[in-house]
Structures are given as structure tokens and as C-alpha cells.
Amino acid sequence: MENIKKDSLSNEEQQIVNKFCEGLAVPNLATVNEFRKSLKELKFKNIKFVDITKNVMPSSKKLYYGCMLSFPLVKALEFFKITPKMLTDNLISGINQYYGIKRKIGCYGIFYAEK
């Protein structure tokens, strides 16, 4: 998930986005509309957005399953102070990126703009 699709989120949807961001140490994500608006404010023209989420889904699904499978082990290793909490948070992020895409909260996309 690299952009938020919806302009407003339910509490549950916002929690998914927050868990995704925390695991990557990213403060937040812009909505597609917010990002487009920022490009306009910076005087970009011919702004186009292409949603490529369907192309990313096979990788997203593999990441999800990998995170789900390794989570119990990594959580145990964190408990014994063998791995950092940051690794556990990163796995949670990988799980939530998939939830976010499946629930159509977020998307992967490409912006094109000319200055």
C-alpha cells in the first residue's frame, strides 16, 4: 500500500493504515486526491494516476503469507531479546498492507506529472 484510496476511513480502516505505517516507520500516507492536489500546488501539469494494484497483488500475497508464517517465531525471538521489536512491527506492516489492499483501503499506483 503506498496511497490511501478513500478520502475518509472508519476507525478499523484507520487502525490498519496505522499498523502498516508504524511497521515501516512512516508517519502517514497521502490519499490519491491529496497527492494529486500537492502536485497541482507545486505547479505540475498533465497529472495522471495509474492504479497498478492488480499487478502488485501476487507479491503482496506472498509477503502476507511470509509475514504470517514467520510472525510467531519472530515474536518469540523478540520476547527473548534476540530480535528487535522493529522486526516484529515490520511483519505486522506486511500483514496489514495486504489487509489494506484487500479491503480497498489503499492501493499501489504510479503518478505521472510534467513541470
Image (cartoon, rainbow, N blue to C red):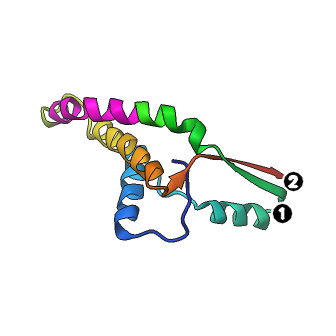
Please say whether residue 68 is one of the residues in the magenta stretch: yes
Residue 73: image location, x then y, percent: 19, 29
Q: Is residue 81 above or below residue 47?
A: above
Q: Which residue is mark 2?
A: 115
Looking at the image, tell me whether mark 1 or mark 2 is earlier in sequence order.
Answer: 1
**Stretch in magenta:** 63-78
**Is 43 situated above or below 66?**
below
Query: What's the residue type where badge 1 is placed?
Result: Lys
- Residues at marks 1 and 2, CA–CA distance in whole angstroms: 7 Å
Magenta stretch, main secondary structure class: helix
Amino acid bearing label 2: Lys
What residue does disc 1 label? 43
Residue under the image location 33 percent in, 34 percent down: 67
Looking at this view, is 21 or 86 the one in front?
21
Residue neighbourhood size for the residue with mark 1, other residues' Cα within 10 Å, grouped as few (<14), some (14–19), many (≥20): few
Q: For numbered disc 2, what is the local secondary structure?
A: loop
Q: Do residues under tags 1 and 2 come within 8 Å of each other at their CB atoms?
A: yes
Front residue of 15/87: it is 15
Q: Is residue 2 shown above or below 14?
A: above
Numbered disc 1: secondary structure: loop
In the shown orientation, is residue 11 left or right of residue 80? right
Quarter of the view holding residue 12: bottom left
Q: Position of residue 56 (x, y in %)?
A: 55, 37
Drawn side of residue 73 relative to residue 111, left or right = left
Crowding near the residue tagged with mark 2, few <14, some 14–19, many ≥20 C-alpha atoms within 10 Å: few
